[in-house]
Amino acid sequence: MSKALETKFNDIVFKNPVLTASGTFGFGREFEEYYDLAELGGLCTKGLTLEPRPGNTGMRLWETPAGMINSIGLENPGVDAFIENEWPHLKGIDTVTVVNVGGKDEASYLEAIERINAINAQLVELNISCPNVKAGGMAYGIKAEMAADITRKVVAVSKAPVMVKLSPNVENIAEIALACEESGACGISLINTIQAMAVDYKKKKIVFDNTYAGLSGPAVKPIALRMTHQVCKAVDVPVMAMGGISTWEDALEFIMVGAACVQVGTMNFIDPKAPVKIIEGLEAYCQAESLVNIDEVRGILL
């Protein structure tokens, strides 16, 4: 493959700008029967927390006309089990593994990061959509001051560069992105799922035990594109975008509004080979447009 898709994200070089999104790819093993994961620019791990989490009770997935709503609840084996059971396999794959980390409070975030320091990860994706139990359940990513505070503290502890993943359920996403950048984030990723709800009219009940859950898939793409554009205009650090990316054309649109890289999420459930098809499509586009590198069209709509 040519170097037309080679992408720099600060000091990290991705062979192409297409990654798989956290929570939609497990730790990659299930997808290895479909293609060589080394074809990816990178993959993001399932969201990890300090302690193992069983996830939410009740219904967890609900299909919508243009996507899905999930109430998984950060089910994961915990950081220690990840380091012992998954990392040895992941580090043998010739691609960038982004380690996604969440937490319930400041102490659990920082302890998880300290343990991850032992594996020399190339990039940490900090999930600040987690509810802060000490702040009455308000997500860290809802207020700029809270986002800045947890970012600053995690960056101070982490040996790996920290990219902050933003929630779209906010008033001013550019303001929060800027606060994270000023607090030492090496990059921004967005968007996380959009808060949504489902009703089962036959059972006359709300579908999810937690009432509200996260909408993803093609339905959210125009919102994700708008927020990516706003954030790319506001910050100087690189941006990794996601939200309804299903085709290479979708990926290209995000790149044109400034994204350095993109993540493919819900589409992995629909077509396990979607990320590879997107990479092939972008490669063909560069060839058709006689681009030496995709960077030539990155940010042309800012």
Image: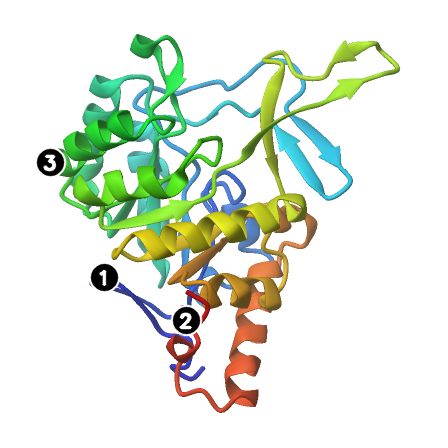
Q: What percent of the width, then of the height, locates residue 53?
A: 43, 19
Q: What percent of the width, then of the height, locates residue 136?
A: 37, 8
In the figure, 161 relative to 171: above or below? below
* Residue 291 in view: yes
Query: Which numbered tag is attached to residue 153?
Result: none
Amino acid at pointer 2: Arg
The residue labelled by disc 3 is: 156
Residue at the far left in the pictured view = 156
Q: Residue at x 62, y 60 (%)?
A: 273
> Residue 71 lies in what quarter of the image?
top right
Please identify the quadrant where the C terminus is shown.
bottom left
Mark 2, mark 3: which one is toward the viewer? 2
Relative placement, left or right, of 93 versus 279 is: left
Q: What percent of the width, then of the height, locates residue 58?
A: 65, 14
Residue at the far right in the pictured view = 202
Mark 2, mark 1: which one is toward the viewer? 2
The residue labelled by disc 1 is: 10
Q: Residue at x 53, y 53 (%)?
A: 225
Instruction: Give how far apart the Cα atoms at labels 3 and 1 are.
Output: 18 Å
Whichever of callouts 3 and 1 sits on the residue coming sooner in the sequence is 1
> In what element is the residue under mark 3?
helix
Whichever of callouts 2 and 3 sits on the residue coming sooner in the sequence is 3
Amino acid at pointer 3: Ala
Q: Which residue is drawn at 63% across and 24% down?
A: 60
Residue at the far bottom in the pictured view = 290
Instruction: Give how far apart the Cα atoms at labels 2 and 3 are.
Output: 31 Å
Q: Nearer the viewer, residue 153 or 228?
A: 228
